[in-house]
Image (spheres, helix red, strand yellow):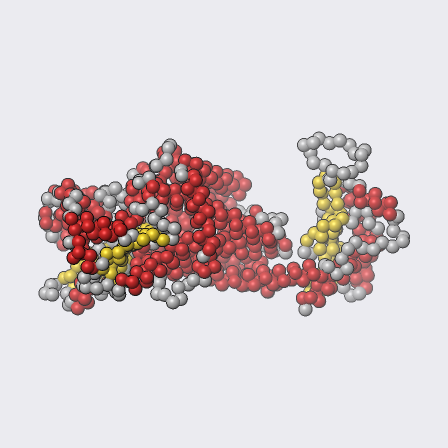
Amino acid sequence: MDVDVLMVLDTSAWAQLGPMGEVLRTTKATKVILDHHVSEDDLGATAFKDSGCEATGRLVIEAAEALGVPLNQEMATPLFAAIATDTGWFRFPSTTDETYEAVAKLVRVGARPADIYGELYERDTMGRIKLRGLTLSRITAELDGALAHTYVLKEDFENTGALPSDTEDLVNQALSIAGTKMALIFIGQLNGGFKVSFRSRCKVDCSELSSRFGGGGHRAAAGAFVDGDFEGVRKLVLDAVREAMKTTFFHWGVHAWAIYAVVALILGYFAYRQNLPLTLRSALYPLIGDRIYGWPGHVVDIFAVTSTVFGVSTSLGFGASQVNAGFNYLFGLPSTTTVQIMIMAGVVGLAVISVATGLDKGIRILSETNMVLAILLLLIVLILGPTVFLLQAYMQNTGAYLSDLVRNTFNLFAYEKTDWIGGWTIFYWGWWLAWAPFVGLFIARISYGRTIREFVMGVLLIPSAFTLFWMTVFGNGAIDQVLVQGKDVLANMVNEDTSVALFVFLEQFPFSSVLSLIAVLMVVVFFVTSCDSGAMVVDMLCSHGKNDTPLWQRIYWAVGVGVVSAVLLYAGGLGALQTMTIAAALPFAIVLLIAISGLLKALRIEAYKRESLQVLAGTPLHSDTDKNWKDRLENIVSFPDENAVRRFVNKTVRTAMAEVGEEFKVQQFDVAIEETDEALMLTVTMGNDPEFVYAVYMTATEQPEFGPTDMPEVDESEKPTYYRAEVHLSEGGQNYDIMGWSKISVINDVIDQFHKHQHFIHLLK
């Protein structure tokens, strides 16, 4: 080929070049690419790519102007067709004023929009009609109708009189079937192999999927060329599609909350059970002891802080993009990086106000407001939408997810060449890990008093069930609008720009303007609460778990998160945010594994302690010199007030602790007796082994229904209380009351608990 310059338009993939691929490989001409797709191969060419441009046709016009090439009617017609089809005939929200200006130039030099539309959509040939009917008759549905696929063999063109170009819109016919979330078509090529076209209306990324076969395209539409016979190609591609769809649902289920649960359990256990700081460094205490307060603990918290900052920054970047898209659709606000950074600055400003007002005011009010808005929007869509269908879909979606849960968990595509695991699964895992310190700290703070079993079941099941329900109501509600009600505008918007899909979806309901306003407020408030609470968490991690830090410190972290997000967004867009999330999550994942080992060791120690407490279990024996049984019964059924319990502790318990403490000293132990407003505590130091603690707390509790008949009457709105002298050991309360015991009985109880503690140390050895 005798040319100086060879230009490739609208693709950067070898597989999509077909026979021209060999020409491109062998030519000595200068090679140039003009493309707006994200995916690309190394074609050995100079690439001019703009993924933010909605149509490659516009890039061609800009290139012509830059080179001084005047436009004419012959050029204008195909360029107008290219821009119109890529923008859904200018209906998609990504269509910018630059596009309209480019189209106006084409019209001025002779492009005829009506003729072009008629040529494309109003001049069906008999061959095209026959091929369409044949292809529709071959459609096969699977995965409960979610996947539809069909095919065209190369001999079908000769048999029907159709041309290869007549297959252009056939895949969308399959996608229009009610309940279909993804469609594909296999088109036989005259020179062998098959062209495969992908279309998606769910979270499956067609460009990622097609890249596995050397192709590329957009998130909702892509294609690839695959060599082989029909049965081999169909099996290869369909297997990949099935896995991709199942993996997509898999990303948003139990696994995310499992990561949060592990971090929250670590933080809550060591903070509330071991009285250690509410930071991740505390998990290392069973492994390195007091060194958690030195550089190893600092390193752990630094990784946690870094992970949280980039996790929140990524969400803030995605949020700014979504809010910008929503404002663009609703109010015409331009969708640019500059505008997104301005939105981000506004969100950070509101977050600063929130953190300045404190946890119980600003953050709490915003969080509760957001929950109310989300639940309100969910209920409105559920009630006004196809309620019965949504409830049925929820049960079916949940069952499908659970049926493949184990298999998908361990499926890392070890025997397949794919970027899916790295591009999406690992990104989501990284995102969950990045958010884990943030969400984990929140969950830990609200879970005080729960058992581990209650905690794990609550964190795993309730949020996962709500997440799946949310996705079902909005996802299946949108599917119903498109495929049952025939509202193609929503499908077109999803294909073009998923950021505004929510607003287009809400337009189909009554009071759409109110619903859209609620949605905008919900999105904005969500990202404000993410920023302010993220700043609070980072501040706590940097302050050894304290939440009474200086105001300037909380503001610093709120602004810092916004600055990081803005820099990454400006430098590399959402791709940079995604990359940094994965990069920050990797070291934290290592730290988390170490923290898990610390938790397991602490729980083993807890089990040994529980076993040791079974030794000599039961009520201490009473000698003949104790009070008689009538006095004991009177103590048991009485309901003493605080003063009575305090007198007992000061007189009997103090004396008993003093006497037994002196005997411990005789046995060469270090003993300390401490007093607080709530308790009297005896501590015996045992070298490098865990110290023995015996404390008696004055605890208020609600009075039972039974009691003496001469008790004074109280207001039914007020719960009558009484006080107990409860025994606490180093691992917490033992849930028994020693009020009224004799000095000898208290001494015997101390010795019994010390005996159990010795057995516990024996088990540790």
Residue occupying the far right of the picture: 625
**Image position, residue 113 (x, y; %):** 15, 42
**Image position, residue 258 (x, y; %):** 51, 55
Residue at left offset 74%, top offset 55%: 694
The part of the image, by quadrant, that contains residue 114 is top left
Q: 214 or 175: nearer the eye? A: 175
The part of the image, by quadrant, that contains residue 662 is bottom right
**226 up-or-down from 369: above or below:** below
Q: Classify the position of the N terminus by image quarter.
A: bottom left
Q: Classify the position of the C terminus by image quarter.
A: bottom right
Q: 228 or 665: nearer the eye? A: 228
On the question of residue 378 being in view, the answer is yes
Number of marks drawn: 0
Residue at left offset 71%, top offset 42%: 701
Residue at left offset 79%, top offset 62%: 665
**Image position, residue 65 (x, y; %):** 15, 51
On the question of residue 679 being in view, the answer is no
Residue 234 located left or right of residue 370: left
**Image position, residue 45 (x, y; %):** 21, 63
Residue at left offset 11%, top offset 52%: 69
Q: 265 or 502: nearer the eye? A: 502
